[in-house]
Image (tube, helix red, strand yellow):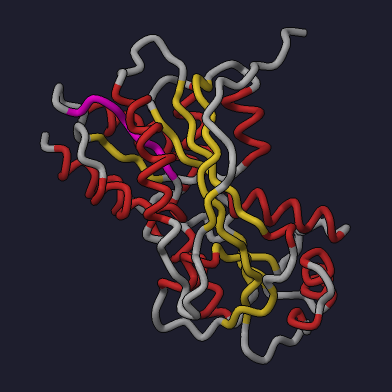
């Protein structure tokens, strides 16, 4: 089976999130010819914001297979040894699933974007006037949304849950709709429902035909950092480390050139060198 065919199959799936992980890993294993030395796992926002296309177009080294899924699934696949390099944006999950158990050979600060709270232009919750992201979420809850959540253990979903917690809101309400889908599909659903949503700003900016407006972005709580990891497992290929070094130098410098519609940078480079993280101590 050709690599390109396998990747098109991965990107086309739309069945429930809970069934994707094992199927994704099975396809990557089946699609890994001898000429494909390593497997990159990354998130829908990395793909849909244009970052993955930059990396794939500039990398001049050996070919690699790519799996795109929510951060939680990518990290679990990496912990199982099914991926060699991952780029994710869920710091708490990264510590719990990859770093803590000792599955991270190298941890490399990468780039950061911003989240934005988006919603209908009428803004019935007056989110645009909120003093903080948590206050904006409280306002959405006070008017009964609606709010569309990804609900898929993605970095965006994890951030959303943290904001509900900071707002003191338990988001188990009929006005909160879980799409179980990627960022673009979730925003299209929010658009159809005249609902609020949490959006990765560079991904939102690349979508066309949305009536959703950016209502709130000015809070450091909406920073969206991505980290690159080289995975520790017995069969890890040497090319994985070479890609990580290239991506955190040449690759991320190119990513920093991506612009939002107002010409401001879509991503900032995150300071810090690659290092071997310390695993959690055994109880």
Residue 215 drawn above or below residue 117:
below
Q: Position of residue 205 (x, y in %)?
A: 47, 73
Which secondary structure class fits the magenta region best? Answer: strand
Image point (37%, 25%), residue name? 241
* Picture quadrant of residue 139: bottom right
Instruction: Work out whether residue 20 can be spotted.
Output: no
Where's residue 109, x and y in %? Answer: 55, 39
Q: State left or right for residue 55 relative to residue 75.
A: left
Q: Position of residue 155 (x, y in %)?
A: 58, 48
Dividing the image into 4 quarters, which one contains the C terminus?
top right
Query: Is 135 rendered above or below residue 75?
Result: below
Q: Is residue 152 left or right of residue 253?
A: right
> Can residue 15 be seen in this snapshot?
yes
Q: In the displayed structure, would residue 254 be above or below residue 127? A: above
- Look at the picture and state if 262 lies above or below 37: below
Q: Residue at x 67, y 79 (%)?
A: 215
Residue situated furthest bottom in the rendering: 122
- Residue in view at x 64 percent, y 16 percent: 279
Q: Kindly identify the residue that appears in the image at 72 percent across and 70 percent down.
A: 218
The boundaries of the magenta stretch are 36-42
- Residue 166 locus on image (x, y percent): 84, 55
């Amino acid at each position: 089976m050709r690599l390109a065919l396998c990747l098109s199959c991965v990107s086309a799936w739309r069945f429930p999130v809970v069934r994707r992980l094992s199927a994704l890993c099975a396809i990557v294993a089946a699609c890994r010819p001898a000429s494909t030395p390593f497997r990159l796992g990354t998130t829908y926002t990395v793909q849909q914001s244009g970052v993955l296309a930059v990396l794939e177009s500039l990398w001049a080294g050996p070919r690699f297979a790519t799996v795109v899924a929510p951060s939680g699934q990518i990290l679990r696949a990496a912990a199982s040894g099914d991926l060699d390099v991952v780029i994710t944006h869920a710091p708490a999950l990264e510590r719990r699933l990859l770093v803590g158990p000792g599955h991270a050979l190298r941890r490399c600060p990468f780039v950061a974007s911003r989240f934005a709270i988006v919603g209908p232009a009428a803004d019935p919750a007056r989110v645009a006037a909120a003093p903080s992201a948590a206050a904006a979420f409280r306002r959405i809850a006070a008017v009964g949304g609606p709010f569309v959540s990804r609900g898929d253990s993605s970095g965006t979903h994890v951030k959303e849950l943290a904001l509900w917690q900071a707002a003191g809101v338990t988001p188990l309400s009929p006005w909160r709709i879980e799409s179980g889908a990627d960022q673009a599909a979730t925003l299209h659903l929010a658009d159809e429902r005249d609902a609020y949503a949490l959006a990765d700003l560079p991904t939102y900016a690349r979508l066309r035909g949305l009536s959703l407006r950016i209502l709130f972005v000015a809070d450091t709580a909406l920073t969206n950092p991505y980290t690159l990891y080289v995975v520790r497992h017995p069969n890890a290929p040497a090319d994985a480390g070479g890609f990580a070094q290239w991506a955190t130098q040449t690759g991320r410098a190119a990513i920093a050139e991506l612009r939002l519609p107002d010409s401001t940078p879509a991503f900032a480079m995150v300071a810090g060198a690659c290092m071997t993280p310390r695993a959690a101590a055994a109880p």
